[in-house]
């Protein structure tokens, strides 16, 4: 067989059925996109596992945009990111729902979507808001989510809303003013406030310092027809709900678990051991978000504050 002719560069000739290789720059770009997509899906799985978003939230994102990181996530990855679901239970669930393990969330058919939503709602029901609003509004959320910053923005732009000032036994941080940011008291005075029934709620936070909400300023403001905003922790929110069942509870969420970690690290007010402990606490706090009437994501302080105010200014019910 005669030799195949070679081109002047010396490269072997292409056979008729061969395909040109994509330019190196295209392969590199495609590899980077693939890595970014995997990282985005991994971040979403962390957010579901830590309850930053609900499984239903992720499912809605997948259905709205099948090409998004949520939409391209395999159903197997999704299910094993949920609490207490391992590979064996995952496979049984898929068999019961009649969904192939190779399916991606964005590629589920109408029947499969209904089946997956039904399964999630039966295991992790989402609680909707109750009818009407209260003039007593509680803003809570995990550590480092930015509750204080959002509450301060609301107070500055809406002076008609009373921002309750809490009492605490912890020392003041730099630039914190007694009576404006907190009432800084010692343990003996805090004990007296509890004994005299002067606190609407109180709790020990992070196993260290105590916080509580003075009752009288809130009662006086409500009697005057004003709206009162309480920026407190999860324990306090539960106590307020028990004491005033009509109170409106708003849960402030971070945009992602990774962002929450970065905010806590960037704050620089805690050591490594304390940060680790607060993050463990945050996971438990995030798991309680369905106890609240509304959820607001603090992706941007101004937007989050505006959304809370819109909830506050909706038609109120008396308390």
Image (cartoon, helix red, strand yellow):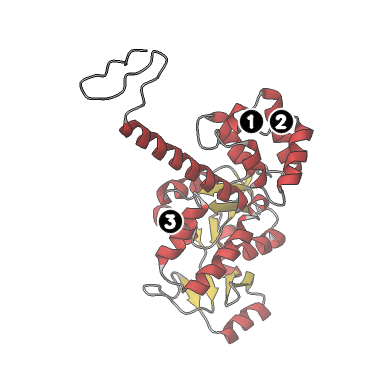
- Element carrying mark 2: loop
Farthest-out residue, left: 8
Farthest-out residue, front: 1
Q: Earlier in the sequence, mark 1 or mark 3?
A: 1
**Where is mark 1, residue-wise?**
103
In the visual, does 238 lie left or right of 174?
A: right
Measured Cα–Cα span from mark 2 to mark 1: 7 Å
Q: Earlier in the sequence, mark 3 or mark 2?
A: 2
**Where is mark 3, residue-wise?**
159
Q: What is the quadrant of the N terminus in the image?
A: top left
Circle 1 Cα neighbour tier, 10 Å, few/some/many (<14 / 14–19 / ≥20): some
**Where is mark 2, residue-wise?**
99
Measured Cα–Cα span from mark 3 to mark 2: 54 Å
Query: In the rendering, at what x and y percent does residue 32 appear?
Result: 39, 40
Q: Is residue 135 visible?
A: no
Question: Depth-wise, is mark 3 or mark 2 nearer the camera?
Answer: 2
Question: Depth-wise, is mark 1 or mark 3 nearer the camera?
Answer: 1
Query: In the rendering, at what x and y percent does residue 38 appear?
Result: 49, 42
Residue at the image point whose x is 31% and y is 23% from the top: 12
Query: In the rendering, at what x and y percent does residue 142 appear?
Result: 56, 60
Residue at the image point whose x is 75% and y is 29% from the top: 98
Q: Are marks 2 and 1 in contact (CB under 8 Å)?
A: yes
């Amino acid at each position: 067989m005669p030799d195949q002719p070679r081109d002047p560069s010396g490269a072997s000739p292409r056979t008729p059925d061969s395909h040109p290789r994509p330019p190196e720059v295209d392969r590199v770009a495609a590899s980077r996109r693939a890595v970014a997509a995997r990282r985005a899906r991994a971040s979403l799985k962390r957010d579901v596992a830590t309850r930053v978003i609900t499984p239903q939230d992720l499912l809605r994102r997948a259905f709205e945009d099948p090409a998004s990181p949520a939409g391209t996530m395999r159903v197997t990855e999704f299910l094993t990111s949920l609490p207490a679901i391992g590979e064996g239970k995952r496979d049984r669930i898929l068999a019961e729902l009649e969904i192939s393990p190779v399916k991606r969330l964005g590629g589920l058919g109408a029947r499969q979507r209904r089946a997956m939503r039904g399964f999630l709602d039966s295991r992790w029901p989402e609680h909707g808001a109750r009818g009407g609003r209260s003039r007593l509004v509680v803003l809570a959320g995990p550590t480092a989510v930015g509750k204080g910053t959002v509450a301060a923005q609301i107070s500055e732009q809406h002076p008609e809303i009373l921002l309750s000032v809490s009492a605490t036994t912890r020392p003041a941080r730099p630039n914190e003013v007694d009576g404006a940011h907190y009432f800084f008291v010692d343990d003996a005075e805090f004990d007296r406030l509890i004994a005299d029934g002067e606190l609407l709620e109180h709790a020990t936070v992070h196993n260290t310092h105590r916080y509580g909400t003075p009752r009288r300023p809130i009662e006086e403001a409500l009697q005057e027809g004003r709206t009162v905003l309480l920026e407190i922790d999860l324990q306090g929110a539960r106590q307020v709900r028990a004491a005033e069942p009509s109170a409106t509870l708003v849960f402030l969420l971070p945009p992602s678990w990774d962002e929450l970690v970065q905010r806590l690290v960037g704050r620089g007010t805690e050591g490594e051991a304390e940060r680790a402990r607060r993050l463990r606490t945050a996971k438990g706090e995030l798991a309680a978000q369905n106890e609240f009437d509304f959820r607001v994501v603090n992706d941007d302080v101004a937007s989050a504050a505006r959304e809370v105010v819109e909830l506050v200014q909706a038609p109120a019910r008396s308390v």
